[in-house]
Image (cartoon, rainbow, N blue to C red):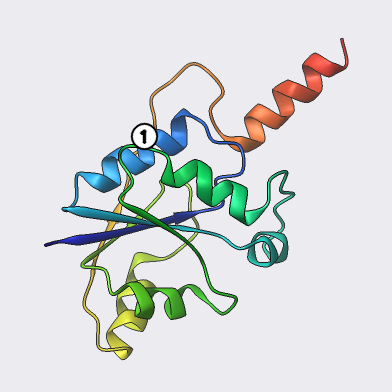
Amino acid sequence: MKKVMASGVFDILHLGHIHYLEESRKQGDFLVVVVASDSTASRNGKKILFSQESRKKMVESLKVVDEAIIGGEGNIFDTISLVKPDVITLGFDQKFDPEVIKEEAGKRGLNPEVYRCSPLDSLEPFGTRKIRKKLQEEGAR
């Protein structure tokens, strides 16, 4: 069984997330999605609306997801060591460097493939920041 790990905040679930998770699922047989903890999301400058438990519940309800977990309070490599994925997928806009991930995973005795997913081709605003901006604009009317 080829285990795939995807990760993100998933605060305002949108088509970009669905695209990322569907593309991630195609990379293996079992998709584990790591939902960022509230403290990790805040530490990385995210203004979250929904709690980590709510975000996890939303993600795990998606058909494409086999398992959802809340990420640890350390760094992503602690979670990678826990999940032991064969493939780690990155969203097209995630700031992680694939080479650093491979190197750090190797230090932990793991050798995952790292796959960068493609962006969703859409005319609609699908990124969380774009959705927030559109909602603010609509509220100002």
Quadrant placement of the N terminus: bottom left
Determine which quarter of the picture holds residue 110: bottom left
Give coordinates of residue 93: x percent, y percent: 48, 47
Q: Residue at x 78, y 15 (%)?
A: 138
Image point (74%, 49%), residue name:
47
Q: Nearer the viewer, residue 66 or 118?
A: 66
In the depicted structure, whether residue 66 falls above or below residue 99: above
Which quarter shows the C terminus?
A: top right
How far from the left and from the top, in percent, is residue 133?
Answer: 73, 28
Going by the image, does 48 lie left or right of 109?
A: right
Mark 1: amino acid: His
SS type, badge 1: helix
Residue hosting label 1: 19
Q: Is residue 42 left or right of residue 11?
A: right
Which residue occupies the extreme left position in the image? 1
Give the answer, above or below, for where 107 lies relative to 118: below
Q: Position of residue 139 (x, y in %)?
A: 84, 17
Q: Is residue 51 above or below residue 43?
A: above
